[in-house]
Amino acid sequence: MKNSNEKVNNLDDITPLETRKEWKLLYHQPGRPGLEEGSKFKGICRYCELKDMCPLPKPEGGVWRCSYYNAFQKKSNLHNNVLEQLKKAKDVVHFDDNICKILTETMNEIVVHFPVKMRDGRVKVFTGYRVQHNNALGPFKGGLRFHPSVDIDEIKALATLMTWKTAITNIPFGGAKGGIQLDPADFSPEEMEKISRRFTFALGNNIGPEYDIPAPDVNTNSQIMAWIQDTYMSTVAPNERNRCVHVVTGKPIESGGSQGREKATGQGVVFLIEKWASEHEMDLKGATYTVQGFGNVGSWAARLMKSHGSKLIAVEDVTGSILNKDGIDPDDLAAYVKVRGGVGGYLKAEPIDHVTFFSTKADIFIPAALENQITDATAELLDVRLIAEGANGPTDPEGDKVLQRRKIAVIPDILCNSGGVIVSYFEWLQNKRSEFWDLEEVDLKLRKTINAAYDRVRKAAETHKVDWRTAAQIVALSRLEMVYKERGIFP
Ligand code: NAD
């Protein structure tokens, strides 16, 4: 991961791909199976996905590189996917054209370029984004992502998904998302603090406790939220300071965070798996599951599944893929990942390649990494009954068609991973009321709220005879349409 945005030499000589510009460069990690020098790669290369054509990788600067195709991965086209999904639902239920026109666009797109002095004394200029998609239902709400793939299109898509998510769950928020294009592994903790604070300062009044409230997402956490909170509170008048505690959610408990927020997204995923299993005669005791992404969402979902007696058998993250059919202890793996930064090299499981990971037979698959992981190719490999989408946009439209044809059930992202924003709402409420709820109360309210959203989606699927992803979209659009019709369009 450390070197994932380095440039490759002689790119023109090594890539025959016509759509090269649309492909994002990635690298093999050291120790990945099939990458031994002197042997041809077996199976499909994790990144270039060209079966048996990926020739000898070579170690360069500590990173193994596929020497011919140099490990390309298709770049996300998430925004198009999100709009395609909107159109699909609109066509089923004939939503108001004018309201759909509004929801197709984002309300505000803020791009900031800000300088930060690095530890070697050089100044680096970063680009940060905050996209506010819609606030008809309440203040803008959504996470901040720090990742090399962040760009305006990705953030627009994720902001739009947030609007659907808050609408489905009936919480009084709109949708937003933000981020910075960077790889946190390239910076020291002190530099990350400076970057986070300077980004907050650059955003200025574009965020605010009653206007737009960020939260953690990929590569951001409660510590980063605390820095953002402190920076924001330091730039308002002293007598306003403590009225701004709720400018971010997902904060550390001591700084006004909520019990249960850290695990909330994973907890929501597991509550919905429980509900789905109880309705589909799946006994979670002994049920097997695989997880892609072992960060906040994936590791919490995996750990909470353990309490049902379910068995984690395969995990994949950016450092590699692992398998143990006798079961992997999620708590032990989480402790390992905390020290080593990823699942790669975990000795209590065997290393496998990307294709073997996707082909592993299990009852449940929890994608909890990035978008566009379940494509037409990987959807064909999956051998599971249920996919519980912890990640945002993990399935592209072509992948979705394959899942529907193969009758693999899906709890779609905008429903499945809504536990995070639900508990963010609880945190925001507690801050506003100066209250502290205990974990039992938070979990109880989360279960009630997310289960009610599940019931709304199931009902829409039955009424309109559509797949659950379309049904979830219909629930969200219905609520937004109602509000726009009640209020009208100003002036
Ligand atoms: P995180 O940074 O804590 O973890 C991300 C995980 O994905 C890591 O294990 C990383 O190694 C893995 N990963 C990254 N690229 C990968 C690749 N190419 N192949 C395999 N694994 C890869 O992030 P998170 O907060 O757990 O978020 C994960 C997903 O869940 C994202 O889609 C995010 O938008 C979504 N989500 C998060 C929250 C939240 O509360 N954190 C809420 C809703 C949705």
Image: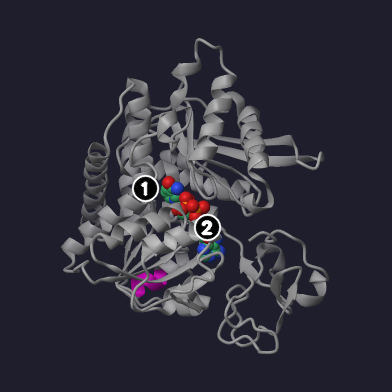
- Specify whether 237 is left or right of 278: right
The kind of residue on which mark 1 rests is Lys
Under circle 2, the secondary element is helix
The first of marks 1 and 2 along the sequence is 1
- Residue numbers of the magenta segment: 401-405
**Picture layout, residue 60 above or below residue 133:** below
Q: Tell me the residue that label 2 is attached to.
A: 339
Q: Is residue 249 magenta?
A: no
Q: Determine which residue is flagged by label 1.
A: 263
Q: Is residue 49 above or below residue 182?
A: below
Q: Residue furthest top?
A: 239
Evaluate whether residue 172 shows in this view: no
Tag 2: Cα neighbours inside 10 Å, few (<14), some, or many (≥20)?
A: few
Q: In front of the other: label 1 or label 2?
A: 2
Quadrant the N terminus occupies: bottom right
| Residue 375 shown left or right of residue 62 in the figure | left
Seen from the viewer's position, the closer of residues 230 and 141 is: 230
The quarter of the displayed image where residue 85 is located:
bottom left
**Residue at left 72%, top 69%?**
62
Residue 260 spot, x, y in % from top left: 33, 42
Horizontal and vertical percent for residue 58? 73, 78
Pinpoint residue 254: horizontal percent, then vertical percent: 42, 31
- Numbered label attached to residue 56: none
Dominant SS of magenta comes to: helix
